[in-house]
Amino acid sequence: MASSKDTTKAKKGDTPTAAAKKAPATKPAAAKKGDDKEPKKRRVRTVAFRAMTKVPLFRRFYVRRILRFIEKSKAKGRPLPADLVRVDQMTAKLPKKKKEKLLEEAMLTSQTDEIQSRELRRAAAKQDRLRGSGGGRRPGSATTGGRPVQRG
């Protein structure tokens, strides 16, 4: 018969392994329908979120919502997500108004950091394109140890 661990019902005369073989197969998590749409949804959410954080009214609403979520989670004894744990640690001893101001400034600086890093990446790519594979030297120039040889 079936063991206590076996969740499928075994027919009379079946061995436990035969009953296990007859169990319905579950689909792997990666084969779920609509998984290919996830990255697109994430991009749409990111674009919408960035647009929302540019408007001060929405940004303040979002900051207050995050702080309210942290407070309620702590009161109910629920674990916070890793990112919010760090935010809570940084703002634990601040008054409510300063917490709001700090988080709002952090959101603004993260946007400017993204813009700056993008500009730096573009400048580096442009420099690489202009420099080419020659490393800035003309073909045919003789060098020793990285310094040009003086002819004369």
Image (cartoon, rainbow, N blue to C red):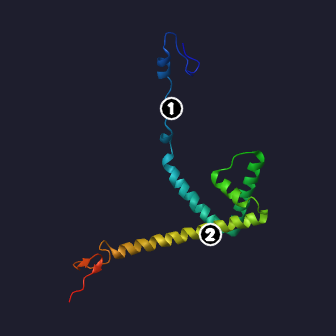
As drawn, 14 above or below 85:
above
> Which badge, 1 or 2, comes first in the chain's sequence?
1
Q: Residue 7 — which label?
A: none
Query: Residue 147 appears at what percent x and percent y?
Result: 29, 79
Question: Looking at the image, which residue is at 64% across and 69% down?
Answer: 108
User: Of helix, strand and loop, which one carries label 2?
Assistant: helix
Residue drawn at (41%, 71%) of the image: 125
> Residue 26: which numbered mark, if any?
1
**Type of amino acid at the residue the image marks with label 2:** Thr
Question: Which one is nearer the viewer's eye here, 73 or 26?
Answer: 73
Q: Are marks 1 and 2 in contact (CB under 8 Å)?
A: no
Residue at 63% of width from left, 55% of height from top? 83
In three-dimensional space, the C-alpha distance between marks 1 and 2, rounded to whole angstroms, equals 46 Å
25 lies left or right of 80: left
Residue occupying the point 28% across, 75% down: 145
Q: Residue furthest top?
A: 13
Quadrant for the C terminus in the image: bottom left
Residue 51 relative to residue 33: left or right: right
Percent position (x, y) of residue 151?
A: 21, 87
Give the SS element for disc 1: loop
Q: Is residue 133 left or right of residue 37?
A: left
- Say which quadrant the N terminus sits in: top right
10 Å neighbourhood of mark 1: few (<14), some, or many (≥20)? few
Tell me the mark number nearer the camera, choosing from 1 and 2.
2
Q: Position of residue 48 (x, y in %)?
A: 60, 61
The quadrant where residue 49 appears: bottom right
> Where is residue 53 shown, x and y percent of the image?
64, 65
Relative to 11, residue 21 above or below? below
The residue closer to the viewer here, 57 or 133, is 133
Q: Residues within 10 Å of mark 2 (few under 14, many from 20)?
A: few
Q: Amino acid at mark 1?
A: Thr
Q: Which residue is mark 2?
A: 109
